[in-house]
Amino acid sequence: MKNPNDLNISLTLISKDVSPEYIPPVSTRAYKLLSVLADGKTHKRSDLAIKHGFGETLRSPLELLKADKYGNWKIDSIDAYTEDSALQLDHRHLSGDPAQDREARRERKKVYKERSAKDAVQGKARLQIAISEMNEAQIAYLMSLGDAANDEQ
C-alpha cells in the first residue's frame, strides 16, 4: 500500500495551482480519491477499491469531485464498460496552467449540466406514472388491511 504521505505530496502539487474551495476537506473520501488521482496516473477501479480502501463503489466521492461542489474535476473513465475500467485525472488539472485547468472544468461542467437537464426531463416524464403506481400500491395495501381485519381468528 502507498505511503499516505506520498498522496499528500501529489495533492499539494496540484493544490497550489487550484482554488482552495475545489479541494475537499481532508477527512473525506472525496479528498482521499483526489489525493490518489493527483499523481496523474491511470488507476484501476479494482485497485482503488482494494488497495486504497474505497470498497465496492467509488460513486459518492467520484460524483462529489465531478460536481459543482468541488469545481467540476474532470476525471476520465478509461475502458469504462470493461472489467479493467480505470480512472485518471485530466492532465490539464496537473499542468500548472490555470487556463488549462479552467478549460477542463468548463468541459466537465458542460457534461454535468447536460446530464442534469436530461435527468430532470426524464423525471418529469415519469412523474405521472410514478404517482399512479404509488396510488395503486397504497390502495392494495389499504385493502389488505381490511381483509386482515375480517380474517377469522
Image: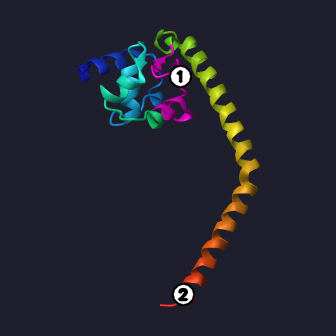
At a point 38% along the width and 30% down the height, the residue shown is: 31
Image position, residue 110 (x, y; %) = 66, 26
Image position, residue 5 (x, y; %) = 25, 21
Q: Is residue 63 left or right of residue 118?
A: left
- Local secondary structure at mark 2: loop
User: Residue 19: within the magenta?
Assistant: no
Image position, residue 152 (x, y; %) = 52, 90
Q: Vertical placement of 40 versus 70: above or below?
A: above
At a point 31% along the width and 32% down the height, the residue shown is: 53
Q: CA distance from mark 2 to mark 1?
A: 54 Å
Q: Nearer the viewer, residue 53 or 101?
A: 53
Residue type, numbered disc 1: Ala
- The residue at which mark 2 appears reads as 151
Residue 16 visible here: no
Image position, residue 123 (x, y; %) = 70, 47
Which sits earlier in the primary sequence, circle 2 or circle 1? 1
At a point 76% along the width and 48% down the height, the residue shown is: 125
At a point 48% along the width and 9% down the height, the residue shown is: 95
Can you tell which quarter of the image residue 40 is in?
Answer: top left
Q: Nearer the viewer, residue 91 or 69?
A: 91
Residue numbers of the magenta segment: 62-90
